[in-house]
Amino acid sequence: MSKGKIFSGAFSAVGGFFDRFRRQSFAYPYVLWMALFVVIPIILIAVYAFTSSSGGFTLDNFSGMIDYAPVFVRSIWLAFVATVACILIGYPVALTISRMSPKNQRILIMLIMLPMWINFLLRTYAWMSLLENTGLINRFLASIGIFDLINSLHAGDLAYTPITHFQLINTDGAVVLGMVYNYLPFMILPIQSVIVKIDPFVIEAAQDLGANSRKVFRKIILPLSLSGVISGITMVFVPAVSTFVISKLLSNGTVMLLGDLIEMQFTGAAYNPHLGSAISLIMMVIVVICMSVMNKFGEGEEQAVVI
Amino acid sequence: MAKELIRLENCRKEFDGEVVLDSISLAIQDKEFLTLLGPSGCGKTTTLRIIGGFLRPDSGTVIFDGVKINDVPPHKRKINTVFQKYALFTHLNVFENIAFGLRVQRPKLSEEEIARRVQESLELVALKGYEKRSVSQLSGGQQQRVAIARAVINRPQVLLLDEPLGALDLKLRKDMQRELKQIQQQVGITFIYVTHDQEEALTMSDTVVVMNKGEIQQIGTPLDIYNEPKNAFVADFIGESNIIDGVMVSDNTVRMYGRNFQCLDKGFSPNEPVDVVVRPEDIDIVEVSQGQMTGTVTEVTFKGMQYDIIVDFQGFKWLIQTTDHSPVGAKIGVKIDPDGFHIMKKSEYSGLYGDYSSYSAEYDELSAAPDDGGQEDE
Ligand SMILES: Nc1ncnc2c1ncn2[C@@H]1O[C@H](COP(=O)(O)OP(=O)(O)O)[C@@H](O)[C@H]1O
Ligand SMILES: [Mg+2]
């Protein structure tokens, strides 16, 4: 046994220099990648945001943005609602999964990730065909006579126009649903991975001291899993606040979000990359502020584990 | 002390078809310091978890203060635990860790009451002034103290301690042993203590329960266990023992190496085969001419307080502890007083222990033996 130790000791002494050298050089491709595809684009966005189409410095892009305040509010609100929904659904799911045997946990995690193997667009299209006025859900409701029933309740009311469907698609609700459906796994997975790491003896210690299962949850499991919730919030809120595909498909443009607005500035008839850059920049600032507030919350917690 | 507090009756536990506890029966008195002692894997923790309520015995009864408690969950038992690896609440500071047991109580206690009792507990474990510290900033010894303070805050009738000193270094261990004993006397409650360290068990306990392979080998005071081991396993596990095949010729006479020795034991059938235990410190080295037996010294190790010498008696090697030096190769005589013999009935362990032929190897094994006390390999 001592022989092995001496050998490995010698190795690490000689290897120390090479280790460090190698480790640093391994980072170069990544640094280069970051510089090329993250830093430089951000600089370009900033340059665009502060210039006009003639090339001169201007703040008009920002002052003009006030017209779009409702879009900002709606985007943040819907992303917020979707994030809260993801927590309310995702936390109990994560908790339930983490109480299962390791084998069942693996199976369930697999099932949760399964939809992610299907193309994002395809998944959202599927929701379209479910939610449409003549979609599966409305057709199903019609076939069991829901609409006839509702209409019959209003029989005799002359001002009443009979309905043939519920308005599901092209609503805020549809957009939130799309967000929750697409991003829920990103809430469940980090929470679950934090909960399973809680030392079972810590839970036993709490029981030992007189805590029933409700108190064990509130005083031990919940606080110890907050770091997972926080990384879940980050991973749901950020993509939700900037999405444009979901709103485009599930609202057909009636619910305009920041992502749609930005997209329009680059590809649409309203072509204005300077305004688009300014909006992107502001959105980035909002996201960074949200994240640092979240991190303040999570301070002192163990580093959240992002799967 | 007379009152019985806990009783285990024929408790049996299997894991995956493997018998981990085989019909354990044990009575624990109020306010006593009882130690479960045995090698790693013998079922000590399992026994403790059954008492704490974290495991249910497959069969058998657990009785607390005259009431069967098999189905009482841990949070309703007047028993608290110091866990093997402390299991502190890392999201709470020292004060809140200790206060936890008070805060989950209903009806709610006042903040002043909580603060006062936490202070008491902190004083008990000499950690005053550490209230605001995060538990992860504390040393192993301090974490240990927090775990104890946390466990006694609810004034349990019984404290369960699972190898609480296993992760501490030797010096700290010795200090904590003394301190734990003091704490036990101060709070005046029953301690059920688990260790695989026989010395720890002997110095701290009122009662020692020696376990092996899920069975209780012997229950007794430290003195009983040391002086009157029931079988070769106990004799070997508690201190050093030379264990020799012998025959109980008649009361007070045992025969080994073809000659009779005087002893104090009786009550065996005539000529019953027995195991004879002779402790290494009960053997006097004398001139060859005056010895009851003669042998050759094959090994000498200086131990500070004494020499450990290995002596070959007709192929069977004995360990003798003596303050007199005898060189390797010397012929020596030995003399054993009648009270130096301890006679045991034959058991499943006969012949397995008590021969020092592989003396040095055995010592190496002892010092290198990994325990389950949470000591991480450095
Ligand atoms: N939850 C469990 N599942 C399966 N086997 C277990 C479990 N707990 C303990 N054992 C087994 O039971 C035996 C006794 O364990 P334990 O009571 O922890 O021993 P000790 O504390 O004396 O070292 C060991 O062989 C151990 O592997
Ligand atoms: Mg153990």
Image: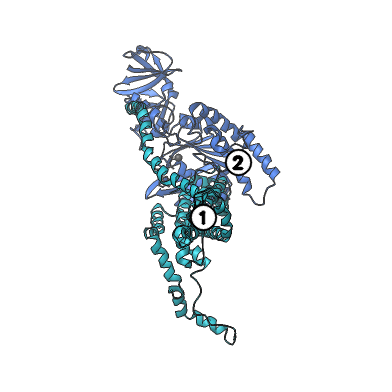
Chain colours: A cyan, B blue
At label 2, the amino acid type is Ile
| Vertical order, A181 against B366 (above or below) | below
Q: Which percent across, then down, holds residue A92?
A: 50, 57
Q: Secondary structure at mark 2?
A: helix
Is residue A212 something one can see in this rendering? no
Q: Residues within 10 Å of mark 1 (few under 14, many from 20)?
A: many
In front of the other: A67 or B209:
A67
Whole-number angstrom distance, CA of label 1 to CA of label 2: 58 Å
Pointer 2 indicates a residue of which chain? Answer: B
Residue ranking furthest to the front: A54
Q: Is residue B32 left or right of residue B45?
A: right
Number of marks in picture: 2
Q: Secondary structure at mark 1?
A: helix
Pointer 1 indicates a residue of which chain? Answer: A
What residue is shown at x 45% (from left), y 17% (from top)?
B304
Q: Which percent across, then down, holds residue B130?
A: 61, 34
**Quarter of the rendering containing residue A137:** bottom left
Is residue B221 something one can see in this rendering? yes
Q: Which percent across, then down, holds residue B169?
A: 48, 29
Asked if the residue under mark 2 is in contact with the one under mark 1, i.e. CB atoms within 8 Å, the reply is no
Q: State the mark number for residue A183.
A: none
Disc 1 target residue: A275
**Do circles 1 and 2 both sit on a common chain?**
no
**Quarter of the rendering containing residue B6:** top right
**Quarter, ligand 1:** top left
Residue ranking furthest to the left: B315
Asked if ligand 2 lies within 8 A of label 2, the reply is no
The N terminus of chain A appears in which quarter of the rendering? Answer: top left
Disc 2 target residue: B98
Q: Which percent across, then down, holds residue A32?
A: 39, 41
What residue is shown at x 53% (from left), y 66% (from top)?
A172
